Amino acid sequence: MSIAHNLKTVLDRISFAASHAGREPSSVRLVVVTKTVDIDRIREAVAAGGLLLGENRVQEAKEKIEKLGSIASWHLIGRLQTNKAKYAVKLFDLIHSVDNIELARELDKQAAKTGKVQDVLIEVSIAGEAAKAGVALSAAADLVREAAKLKNIRIKGLMTMPPYSDEPEASRPYFRKLSELRDRLEQESIPNVSLKELSMGMSGDYEVAIAEGATLVRVGTAIFGERH
């Protein structure tokens, strides 16, 4: 199947899942994950309606953005090292992976240098997997409160990645916990924090994520096929 066909299928399934959950389809946006995908195939996805592109690594994104320009909005969805923050604020409209206060402070510092307010999500490790990034669930609220004090970053929501499973329903408890965390934090009305966005769900489980409140789903394999 073509990239255009695959992308339309994903968009149709997003729309159906949102409607089935009693939500407006427009409340869920697709982040097309372009990790390892070549330039021509990315152009195909954009031409077919992929308006948000997600990259895992700063260097790979930099090379692609230099060639493609601002054909879409670019999101960083992978782990970000503090020493790459100065590049990230120049490249990305939204950074999904802030998981410690040192990184938040460095992004704030670098964004201030460029006169930018950088939109970010706080990445939460619901399952506490050592190999994955993310602030522990028990520490997430404190990180949101502390990072909210910074003037040149703006917290727009939360992100998580559940443990890998072949069964989409296995992800539901993790998505639900992120949604519940968001609801608790919203009750605090923390200044400089909107928490509008929940970035959760990938090719295997994005429909479950939508049922639990996802506003951004990160899909690559279902559009481009398996990576080699």
Image (tube, grey):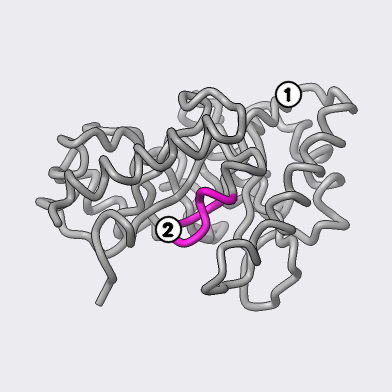
- For the N terminus, which image quadrant? bottom left
- List the residue tagged with mark 1: 192
Which residue appears at 81% of the width and 43% of the height? Answer: 180
The label nearer to you, 1 versus 2, is: 2
Q: Nearer the viewer, residue 94 or 199?
A: 199
Q: Is residue 28 magenta?
A: no
Taken as a whole, is the magenta stretch helix, strand or loop? loop
Q: Residue at x 82, y 40 (%)?
A: 146
Front residue of this view, candidates 41 and 14: 14
Residue 205 lies in the magenta stretch: yes
User: Image point 84% across, 45% down: which residue?
Assistant: 141
Q: Is residue 109 left or right of residue 204?
A: right
Q: Is residue 52 above or below residue 167?
A: above
Q: Say few, some or many: other residues with alpha carbon within 10 Å of mark 1 (under 14 / 14 to 19 / 20 or more).
A: some
Please give the label number shown on residue 203: 2
Image height of 61 relative to 125, above or below = above
Q: From mark 1 to mark 2, how far is it between C-alphas?
A: 32 Å
Query: x, y (%) of residue 175?
Result: 68, 52
Judge left or right: residue 89 versus residue 136: left
Q: Upstream in the sequence, badge 1 or badge 2?
A: 1
Taking the spot 58% from the left edge, 51% from the top edge, the residue there is: 208
The crowding category of the residue bearing disc 2, from other C-alpha atoms within 10 Å (few below 14, some 14 to 19, many at least 20), is some
Q: Which percent across, then down, holds residue 94?
A: 49, 37
- As helix, strand or loop, the secondary structure at mark 1 comes to loop
Q: Give the image location of residue 7, x and y in percent.
A: 26, 45
Q: Is residue 38 left or right of residue 190?
A: left
Q: Nearer the viewer, residue 67 or 109?
A: 67
Q: What's the magenta region?
A: 201-208
Amino acid type indicated by mark 2: Ser
Q: How far from the left and from the top, in percent, is residue 127?
A: 74, 68
Amino acid type indicated by mark 1: Asn
